[in-house]
Structure formats: C-alpha cells, structure tokens
Image (cartoon, rainbow, N blue to C red):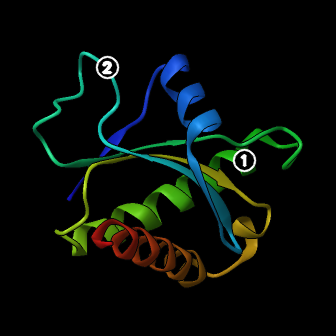
C-alpha cells in the first residue's frame, strides 16, 4: 500500500476537527476514511494519506520534534508495506514525547494496533 502526503491547511484542519481519534502510547492519530479533496489526490488509487503535527509544546528543539515525526511516519510506512487490504484513508499523526526515546519496535507495535482497529472497524 502506498503512503502519500496529506497536504493543505484546509484538508488537515478537516481531519483534525472531524476525524475519529485513536490514542496510542507513542502517538495519537486522527483519521477519516476516503481520499482527501485535493486535485493531486487520485480517488481511484488506494493509498493512505498521512500528515504529522508536532507542537512546540512537545519539545523545545525543532530537530527533536522532526525526529519524532520521521520515526512515526517511517513506522507507518514499513507496516503499510506489509498490508494490502487497508482502505483509503487520511491520517494526522500527533507524536508524543515518548516516541523520541522509545524503541522503534514500540512505535511499530502502536501502528499495528491502530491498523488492526481500523481494519476490523471497516469490515463491520
């Protein structure tokens, strides 16, 4: 499954305000089913559109906030590569400060838990 960027202020605001919330140990995800309403997004292509938000309240250093974003996005990318039966959705990842110091396997386990919740919810 392809991981694409969620871009655009209006699109991210829509996901942030109307999306369902899933809380994990290393990050929080707000998500909406379906593709974003953006000219670059192909509605026929199955993909997961992901964006990240890390407030300066999370950590003073921008370098460390960016590292948290990258670790969460990479864990999502590696887990999505293994799955093919996930429907198209929009995700906003909010890393927690724990995502900076924990093992990468912990972040991947959180991603697996989220994807299992989403895949079971879509089959009902």
User: Count of labels shown?
Assistant: 2
Q: Quadrant of the N terminus?
A: bottom left
Between 111 and 19, the one lying in front of the other is 19
Of the image marks 2 and 1, the number of the one nearer the N terminus? 2
Q: Nearer the viewer, residue 26 or 105?
A: 26
* x, y percent for residue 13: 60, 26
Residue 94 is situated, as x and y percent measured from the top left of the image, at 66, 51
- Position above or below: 105 against 73: below
Residue at 74% over, 51% down: 64
Q: Look at 64% across and 34% down and name the residue there.
A: 17
How far across and down, in percent of the image, does residue 48 sit?
32, 49
Q: Residues within 10 Å of mark 1 (few under 14, many from 20)?
A: many
| Figure check: 61 above or below 11 | below
Kindly indicate whether the residue at mark 1 contacts the one at mark 2 (C-beta within 8 angstroms).
no
Residue 35 got which mark?
none
Cα–Cα span, label 2 and label 1? 27 Å
Q: What residue would you read off at disc 2? A: 38
Q: Is residue 68 left or right of residue 62?
A: left
Q: Residues within 10 Å of mark 2 (few under 14, many from 20)?
A: few
Q: Secondary structure at mark 1?
A: helix
Q: Is residue 33 left or right of residue 12?
A: left
- Element on which disc 2 rests: loop
Q: Is residue 7 left or right of residue 21?
A: left
Q: Residue at x 18, y 69 (%)?
A: 85
Q: Which residue is mark 1?
A: 65
Is the residue 4 above or below the residue 116 in the image? above
Residue at 65% x, 40% y: name it: 53
What x and y, as percent, mark residue 8? 47, 20
The residue lying furthest to the left in this view is: 44
Q: Is residue 89 above or below residue 109?
A: above
Q: Nearer the viewer, mark 2 or mark 1?
A: 2
Q: Quadrant of residue 106?
A: bottom right
């Amino acid at each position: 499954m392809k991981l694409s960027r969620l871009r655009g202020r209006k699109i991210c605001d829509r996901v942030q305000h109307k999306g369902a919330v899933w809380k994990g140990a290393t990050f929080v995800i707000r998500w909406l089913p379906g593709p974003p309403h953006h000219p670059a997004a192909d509605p026929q292509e199955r993909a997961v559109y992901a964006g990240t938000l890390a407030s300066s309240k999370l950590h003073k250093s921008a370098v460390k906030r960016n590292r948290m974003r990258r670790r969460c996005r990479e864990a999502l990318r590696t887990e999505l590569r293994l799955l093919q039966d996930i429907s198209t959705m929009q995700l906003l990842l909010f890393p927690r400060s724990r995502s900076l110091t924990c093992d990468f396997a912990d972040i991947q386990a959180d991603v697996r838990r989220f994807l299992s919740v989403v895949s079971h919810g879509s089959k009902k």
